[in-house]
Amino acid sequence: MLKEELDLRTLDDDTISEDCSRTSDAAEAWWFLFIAGDMIVMERGGVISVPLAANPTALGLQGGREWHLGTLDGHRCYGAEIGINMPIPDGMAAWGLRDLYEHLDKSHHRIAMKASHMIEWDRTTGFCSRCGTETRRAEGVVAKECPACGFLMFPRLSPAVIVLIERDNKLLLARARRFKADVYSVLAGFVEPGETLEETVRREIEEEVGIRVKNIRYFGSQPWPFPDSLMIGFTAEYESGEIRIEEEEIVDAGWFEPDSLPNIPGKISIARQLIDWFIEGKSKGASKTPL
Ligand SMILES: [Zn+2]
């Protein structure tokens, strides 16, 4: 098992507890504070950390859209948004979530991702999407409700499949138009209403690169709050067809040997975990089984 996968897979309910039974009586909490989409962290002596404080005011900040996210190490965790014009105090800085991945403890980063998702959802559900009335928080459930018509809006999750395709010890990588220049990755696409995940895998691959696959197997999943996805990873084997790229979305695609890969995504992503898992299996020469 790769280290990154281990980190994701061992973060169980005991690590991030939704109940408060293990909350210490210390009033300090972990604060996952966002300003203009970036997270505010402590920067002291070259060490990056999540602020631990009674409230944002104690840090010299003022927050809104506050959500309780669970409990970690005996402290409650909260996400909140800071006004875009508020100055960031000395000793603190705003970082992008992707950049923070290498600097934060994995459990802190997981909660930071959740905080980002919740704040963005809160921001975009201020009014009922059925009747236009201003919403409020529902009681006893994580949702916003409309006081006029009773409509409930739950946090939005947009599931997407991501697939590593193997053919004769090579893997298929593609450069999407939305990627930074020169980065190649495995294929991904959103699930459409009425589809099973396996149907999404077949449809996306056929649409984007014109090939058919077989032996679709579940690999793992990853919350991906940019802004609200859940990535569901699969492996698959080539069955038939030749690569024919869908030019609106894909710039280039091809089969790559494990020892001659182009630039690939960073370690934060399940795309990279899929690629690393494939490479590791090939370097060991062992038969691979999804974890
Ligand atoms: Zn309404």
Image: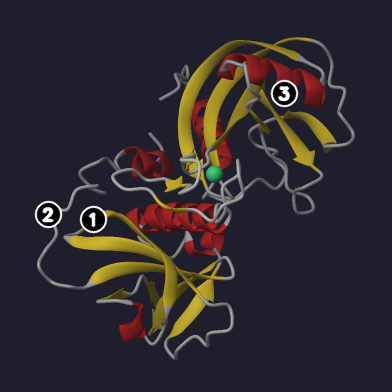
- Going 26% across and 49% down the picture, which residue do you hit? 16
| Visual colour scheme | secondary structure
- Residue 53 in the image, given as x and y percentages of width and height: 27, 77
- Residue 244 in the image, given as x and y percentages of width and height: 87, 22
Say if mark 3 contacts mark 2, CB within 8 Å: no
Q: Which numbered tag is attached to residue 71?
A: 1
In the shown orientation, is residue 261 left or right of residue 252? left
In terms of secondary structure, where does tag 1 sit?
Answer: strand
- Going 64% across and 14% down the picture, which residue do you hit? 199
In terms of secondary structure, where does tag 3 sit?
Answer: helix
Residue denoted by label 3: 204
From the image, which quarter does the N terminus lie in?
top left
Q: Is mark 1 within 8 Å of ligand 1?
A: no
Say if mark 2 contacts mark 1, CB within 8 Å: yes
Of residues 65 and 95, the one drawn nearer to the viewer in this rendering: 65
**Which residue is outermost to the front?**
148
- Going 70% across and 48% down the picture, which residue do you hit? 263
Q: Is residue 221 visible?
A: yes
- The crowd level at tag 2 (other Cα within 10 Å; few <14, some 14-19, many 20+) is some
Q: Which numbered tag is attached to residue 22?
A: 2
The amino acid type found where label 2 is placed reads: Arg
Q: Is residue 168 visible?
A: no
- Residue 87 in the image, given as x and y percentages of width and height: 52, 88
Of residues 55 and 110, the one drawn nearer to the viewer in this rendering: 55
- Going 47% across and 20% down the picture, which residue do you hit? 288
Of callouts 1 and 3, the N-terminal one: 1
Q: Distance between the Cα atoms at labels 1 and 3?
A: 38 Å
Tag count in the figure?
A: 3
Of residues 237 and 94, the one drawn nearer to the viewer in this rendering: 94
- Relative to 29, residue 170 above or below: above
The amino acid type found where label 3 is placed reads: Glu
In the shown orientation, is residue 279 left or right of residue 247? left
